């Protein structure tokens, strides 16, 4: 294995172990020593890769963003109808958000740590979703599947309409959003756009 590939593999292993430990014990109680032991590197080596826990949290954020981009690109490249891709995309994002929010008793602490090191994270996520929604709607219009009056406006309204289904661990919510409700909202939009096609 080349030194560069070995370094990338070590970084990936550190990030994966950090994600697991942050979710299991919280960011505050996860020590760099424990993390180094989990990965099988010396503590000094760990600090060469990530000088602080905040650097590691930020790296995990970047990894999450990259996974979102890759999943969106793979979906956009598929040959499925645009309406099917739109449903699949929002369902995938819904499940990822739900797992982030419910998958650990430390969701609030992890979210606070993320927003401390990446204060624009929520806005960046919204912009990434908006760009993907726009691309999917544009494809649907180009293929003649969806009749849109205003591509940018329709994408923005759709994002606003589904936004309630993506609360963070910091959001006060009376009850958890449901997958079926999200799909009902998406299907409502799709029916209108198909009627205009």
Image (spheres, rainbow, N blue to C red):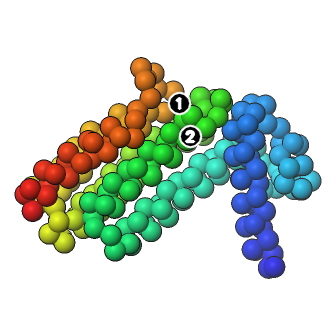
Closer-to-camera residue (168/185) = 185
Q: Is residue 8 above or below residue 166?
A: below
The residue at which mark 2 appears reads as 100
Position of residue 24 measured from the top left corner of the image (x, y, whole percent):
73, 37
Left or right of 96? Residue 140 is left
Left or right of 126? Residue 105 is right
Task: Give the distance between the C-alpha atoms of the residues marked 2 and 1, in whole angstroms.
Answer: 8 Å
Closer-to-camera residue (115/178) = 178
Position of residue 122 measured from the top left corner of the image (x, y, whole percent):
45, 40
Dividing the picture into quadrants, the one containing residue 34 is top right
Residue visible at 44% across and 49% down in the picture: 93
The residue at the far bottom in this view is 2
Residue 174 visible in the shown view: yes
Left or right of 175? Residue 53 is right
The residue at which mark 1 appears reads as 169
**Proximity of marks 2 and 1: CB atoms separated by less than 8 Å:** yes
**Which secondary structure lies at badge 2?**
helix
Q: Is residue 116 above or below residue 14?
A: above
Residue 111 visible in the shown view: no
Dividing the picture into quadrants, the one containing residue 54 is top right
Residue visible at 38% across and 72% down in the picture: 78
């Amino acid at each position: 294995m080349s030194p560069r590939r070995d370094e990338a593999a070590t970084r990936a292993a550190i990030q994966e172990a950090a994600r697991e430990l942050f979710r299991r014990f919280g960011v505050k109680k996860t020590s760099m020593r424990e993390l180094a032991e989990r990965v099988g590197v010396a503590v000094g080596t760990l600090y060469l890769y990530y000088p602080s826990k905040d650097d590691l949290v930020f790296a995990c954020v970047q990894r999450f963003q990259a996974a979102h981009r890759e999943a969106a690109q793979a979906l956009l490249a598929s040959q499925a109808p645009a309406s099917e891709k739109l449903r699949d995309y929002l369902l995938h994002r819904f499940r990822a958000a739900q797992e982030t929010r419910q998958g650990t008793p430390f969701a609030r602490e992890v979210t606070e740590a993320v927003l401390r090191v990446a204060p624009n994270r929520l806005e960046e996520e919204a912009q990434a979703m908006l760009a993907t929604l726009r691309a999917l709607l544009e494809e649907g219009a180009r293929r003649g599947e969806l009749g849109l009056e205003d591509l940018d406006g329709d994408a923005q309204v759709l994002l606003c309409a589904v936004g309630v289904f993506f609360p963070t661990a910091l959001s006060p919510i009376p009850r958890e959003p449901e997958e079926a409700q999200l799909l009902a909202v998406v299907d409502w939009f799709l029916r209108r756009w198909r009627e205009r096609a």
